[in-house]
């Protein structure tokens, strides 16, 4: 009887370990004043890898799924490299379709995106046309394979292959972003080689100092009733890695700057940034 009881109590933990799920203690973050000052609703989650701590503000929203928008470029880059849809990050240039991306009547992408660009430039500048060209090379079947294996959000790749991460089909929660990014940082996303991980590590860097390295990507989802802005990534500082993901409502484009402002303040509060 006792052995059956122990087995029943331990089974959920054993299954979680087998699935690669980290059972992290969750600690609240007091980020409400930051979002209130911006006048918007939002959430942020930071995962301290070494201490297996999940630090969260607004867990209800963190469990709500939204389109990943351009944050999907992190995984899309890995998939493109792994499948050979793009040969490398500097020499194999992705074509431009001649269309300038507009939102609210204004161009929303840097001018450098209005030309063929290598993956390094496409990721840094969030060049949607380049990644759409990449997606057409990858194909729906390959996306279904990789997203399913990684349990990336709802793994929904239906619809046009070059728009599923933009048009609301693919959805992901902030907690699910953390799960994926934790694996990306640790080079453990299923079916991805070390060569592809190293290439991503290189092109995802936005800040590097003797004290820390920050890898991150913004996102701007326009498929819902209200635009949603993302900022996700990870910080390596000595032996420590801090994975983070945040999103907020963007009723006006100007709110976009608050993504990094809020996240950087929180990352400093938890010791991820100096």
Image (cartoon, rainbow, N blue to C red):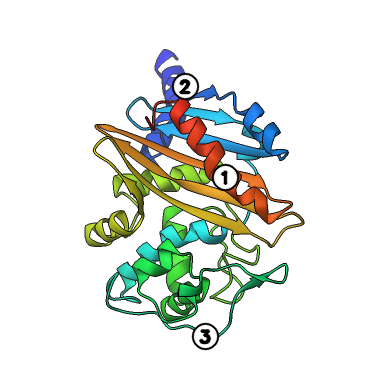
Mark 2 vs mark 3: in front: 3
Q: Which mark is residue 241?
A: none
Query: In the shown orientation, is residue 122 left or right of residue 262?
Result: left
> Residue 144, position in %: x, y?
48, 67
Does residue 98 lie above or below 239 as drawn? below
Q: Earlier in the sequence, mark 2 or mark 3?
A: 2
Asked which secondary structure carries label 2, the reply is helix
Q: Residues within 10 Å of mark 1 (few under 14, many from 20)?
A: many
Residue at horizontal 65 percent and vertical 27 percent from the top: 33
Residue at horizontal 42 percent and vertical 50 percent from the top: 216
Can residue 2 be seen here? The reply is yes
Q: Which residue bears the numbered disc 1? A: 259
Q: Earlier in the sequence, mark 2 or mark 1?
A: 2
Q: Are marks 2 and 1 in contact (CB under 8 Å)?
A: no
> Residue 271, position in %: x, y?
39, 26
Instruction: Work out which quarter of the rendered image holds the N terminus and state it.
Output: top left
Give the quadrant of residue 123: bottom left
Q: Which residue bears the numbered disc 2? A: 9
Instruction: Work out which quarter of the rendered image holds the C terminus and state it.
Output: top left
Residue at horizontal 42 percent and vertical 71 percent from the top: 142
Does residue 157 lie above or below 42 as drawn? below
From mark 1 to mark 3, how far is it between C-alphas?
30 Å
Between 122 and 75, the residue placed more toward the observer is: 122
Between 220 and 136, the residue placed more toward the observer is: 220
Does residue 251 lie above or below 30 as drawn? below
Does residue 132 lie above or below 198 as drawn? below
């Amino acid at each position: 009887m006792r052995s059956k009881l122990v087995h029943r109590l331990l089974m959920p933990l054993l299954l979680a370990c087998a699935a690669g799920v980290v059972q992290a203690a969750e600690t609240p973050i007091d980020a409400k004043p930051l979002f209130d000052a911006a006048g918007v609703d939002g959430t942020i989650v930071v995962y301290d890898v070494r201490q297996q701590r999940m630090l969260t503000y607004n867990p209800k929203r963190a469990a709500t799924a939204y389109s990943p928008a351009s944050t999907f470029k992190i995984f899309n880059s890995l998939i493109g490299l792994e499948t050979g849809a793009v040969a490398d990050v500097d020499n194999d240039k992705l074509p431009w379709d001649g269309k300038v991306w507009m939102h609210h009547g204004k161009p929303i992408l840097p001018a450098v995106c209005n030309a063929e660009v290598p993956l390094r430039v496409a990721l840094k500048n969030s060049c949607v046309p380049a990644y759409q060209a990449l997606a057409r090379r990858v194909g729906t079947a390959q996306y279904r394979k990789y997203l399913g294996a990684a349990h990336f959000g709802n793994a929904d790749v239906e619809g046009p292959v070059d728009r599923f991460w933009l048009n609301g089909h693919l959805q992901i929660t902030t907690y699910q972003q953390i799960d994926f990014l934790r694996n990306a940082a640790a080079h453990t996303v299923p079916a991805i080689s070390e060569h592809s991980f190293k290439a991503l590590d290189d092109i995802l860097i936005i800040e590097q100092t003797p004290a820390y390295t920050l890898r991150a990507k913004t996102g701007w989802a326009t498929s819902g009733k209200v635009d949603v802005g993302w900022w996700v990534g990870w910080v390596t500082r000595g032996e420590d890695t801090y994975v983070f993901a945040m999103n907020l409502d963007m009723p006006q484009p100007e709110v976009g700057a608050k993504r990094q402002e809020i996240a950087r303040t929180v990352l400093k509060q938890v010791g991820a940034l100096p």
